[in-house]
Image (cartoon, rainbow, N blue to C red):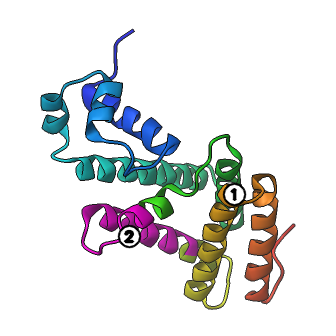
Amino acid sequence: MTAPPVRERILASATHLFDATSIRSVSADRVIADAGTTKVTFYRHFRSKDHLVVAYLEDQLRLLQEAVDRERAEGADACAVLLRLAAANGDAACRPGFRGCTFINAAAEYPAAGNPVRDAVEQYRGWLHAVVTELLTELAVEGPDVVADQLIMLRDGAMVHGFMGDPAGVAGSLTTAGRAIISAHRRTPLPA
């Protein structure tokens, strides 16, 4: 069996280590050791640890985008995609060792505007808002931008609750509250 390319190995090690602890607590040296590579090789692929963090966040965003695209390609309607997003967030919050949303954590660890890590978080937030707004528009929700903000706030709270509180109820509560918000902004109720 062939080993994955070095860049992917470094990114996989970073993902594992960042998810297990935090971004700031993991040094580039620790990622290098975990990936079984050298500093020269690491810096050939990533100019700095911040560039590695950006690649990590971009990879997480890519996975989410692919999941939504796959749902849409398989013919899922807007309601089904929103439900799948809620379920995915609930599943994440219930997994052992969950430490909160990757992007919220990165924003907290890199609060300065203009930092490339913060820019990667903003790219995710912009994508999420656009996707949710588009889905809400398809569902004939009045004020889809405002409702998207509400659903994203709800999702953010669910991620924090999954880490700080009882993760077992996150998926169900997120879905129930999301349906209530959407139904409050539609002329017809959502299908069951």
Per the model, the C-alpha gap separating discs 2 and 1 is 22 Å
State which quadrant residue 10 falls in: top left
Indicate which disc, 2 or 1, sits on the residue closer to the N terminus: 2
- Using residue 96 as the reference point, say whether residue 45 is left or right of it: left
Magenta segment: 107-132
Residue in the foreground of this view, choosing between 142 and 9: 9
Q: Is residue 110 magenta?
A: yes
Q: Residue at x 78, y 87 (%)?
A: 184
Question: Which amino acid type is marked by label 1?
Answer: Gly
Q: Residue 96 appears at what percent x and percent y?
A: 67, 40
Question: Which amino acid type is marked by label 2?
Answer: Glu
Q: Residue 123 appears at what percent x and percent y?
A: 37, 67
Assign the N terminus to one quadrant of the image. top left
**Dot 1 corresponds to which residue?**
162
| Relative vertical location of residue 52 with respect to residue 136 in this rendering, above or below | above
**Dot 2 corresponds to which residue?**
122
Q: Residue at x 30, y 72 (%)?
A: 112
> Pointers 2 and 1 in contact (CB under 8 A)?
no
Q: In the structure shown, which secondary structural element does the residue marked by tag 2 occupy?
A: helix
Q: In the structure shown, which secondary structural element does the residue marked by tag 1 occupy?
A: helix
| Relative vertical location of residue 20 with respect to residue 93 in this rendering, above or below | above
State which quadrant residue 83 falls in: bottom right
